[in-house]
Amino acid sequence: MDSYVVMRVGSERYAAHVAQVRSVERVGDITPVPRTLPFIKGVMHLRGAIVPVIDLAERVGLTRAADGDEEDRRIVVAEVDEMAVGMLVDAVEDVVSIAPEAIEPPPSVVGGLEAVYLRGVARWGEHLLVLLNLERVFSAVETEQLRQVEKLVHG
């Protein structure tokens, strides 16, 4: 059994492998960084480190629910290509165990994401849980821009 952190983005449920998740944080001050990709919201200060923050809804092409509760919003700090990246989500709902045999290969397009970004899909109660492959969520160009943001802030 593998453990996954379940995140809600709009009406969709996504999950990241717990081994990639460093922490779940309340949304605090995010400092915008000019001339970055639209889904890069800026950077945040986290326990002595500067972490780039992306809006996962914008990255995967979803619209945020208008009735979403600001109190529930979180930043999931994950390890992507040896770099900490914060992902703004509408809520973190649970940590669940999923047996590898319960994971099905993803259809060609699920919840706005191409299959290359997915580890697979699994049932979670009444919901379909989309398991993210975080290394593939960002293209090489996007990862480089995140690194540039990190360098810009660190000087």
Image (cartoon, rainbow, N blue to C red):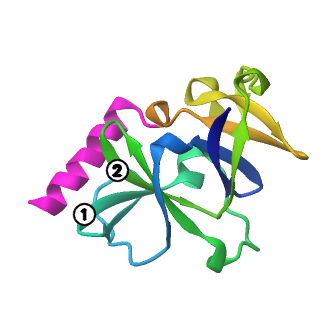
Q: Are the residues tagged 2 and 1 within 8 Å (C-beta)?
A: yes
Quarter of the image for residue 154 reads bottom left
**Magenta span includes 146:** yes
What residue appears at the point 60 percent right and 70 percent down from the top-left corner? 73
Report helix, strand or loop for mark 2: strand
**Camera-side residue: 152 or 82?**
82
Q: Where's residue 140, x and y in %? A: 34, 30
For badge 1, the amino acid type reads Ala
Please state if 150 lies on the left or on the right of 102 as rendered: left
In the figure, 124 relative to 113: above or below?
below
Q: Where is residue 65 in the image (x, y as percent from the top left)?
A: 73, 65
Q: Earlier in the sequence, mark 2 or mark 1?
A: 1
Q: Is residue 68 magenta?
A: no
- The residue where tag 1 is placed is 49
Question: Disc 2 marks which amino acid?
Answer: Ala
Q: Is residue 34 left or right of residue 69?
A: left
